[in-house]
Amino acid sequence: MPGTKPVLSVLSAIKSYFTASLHPTSEARVTIVALLVEERDCELLVDVCHRHRWDVRFAGTCADASDAANRLKAPLVFCDRDLPGTDWRDLVHVLAAPPHNACVVLVSRVTDAYLWDEVVHKGGYDLLSKPLQEVDVVRVVKLGWSYWNTTRGRRENAG
């Protein structure tokens, strides 16, 4: 049928765009900012990011994490619940709001429905239990990237 080839090409391009956006492959350069207390969690995050070719940047303070998330336009921020001298609620609230619009993942030894509800209520994306496990990190990064890319990221790029 005449004229169907351009339509199919457009549809194929749209499908490719959304597939790449929603399902990051090892080639997707996802940037993660991490503010973690325990060395074991840091090491695991480095290993996972290396295997998946994701970028991870560690911050030493809340201010550093905020600056890095803004400068790098990081779609994901991992934040330790047990940060000395800092209330995680404030950090989650700041990083999840503009201009950051990051998917903030709280890392905690306590992971119950009450804490998850509080994280989400403050604007956070998810809650992971300590010590971090590779399967959980991969899951939350892929889903967080997809969510950020389809909602928060597009809104940021449109504005």
Image (tube, grey):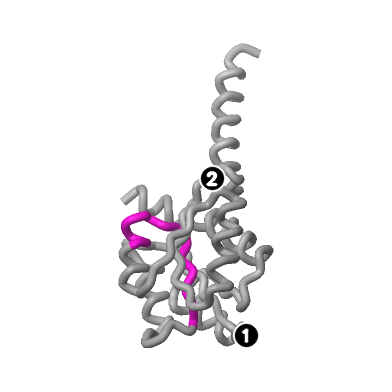
- The residue lying toward the viewer, choosing from 24 and 9, is 24
Identified at 37% across, 61% down, the residue is: 69
Q: From this view, report whether residue 4 is shown above or below residue 153.
A: above
Q: Residue furthest top?
A: 2
Identified at 31% across, 72% down, the residue is: 63
- Picture coordinates of residue 90 (x, y %)? 37, 80
Q: Label 1, on which residue?
A: 112
Q: Is residue 100 magenta?
A: no
User: Are the residues at dot 2 and dot 1 in contact (C-beta closer than 8 Å)?
Assistant: no
- The quadrant in which residue 109 appears is bottom right
Q: From this view, report whether residue 148 is shown above or below residue 114.
A: above
| Label 2 vs label 1, nearer the camera | 2
Q: Amino acid at mark 2?
A: Ala
Q: Residue furthest right?
A: 135
Q: From this view, report whether residue 70 is shown above or below residue 110.
A: above
- In the picture, which quadrant includes the N terminus? top right
Residue 90: mark: none
Q: Label 2, on which residue?
A: 28
The Cα–Cα distance between marks 2 and 1, rounded to whole angstroms, is: 32 Å
- Picture coordinates of residue 82 (x, y %)? 48, 84
The tally of labels here is 2
Q: Classify mark 1: residues with Cα within 10 Å, few (<14), some (14-19) or many (20+).
A: few
Q: Classify mark 2: residues with Cα within 10 Å, few (<14), some (14-19) or many (20+).
A: some
Secondary structure beneath dot 1 equals loop
**Which stretch is magenta?**
68-81
Q: Earlier in the sequence, mark 2 or mark 1?
A: 2
Q: Amino acid at mark 1?
A: Asp
Secondary structure beneath dot 2 equals loop
Is residue 149 in sight in this rendering? yes
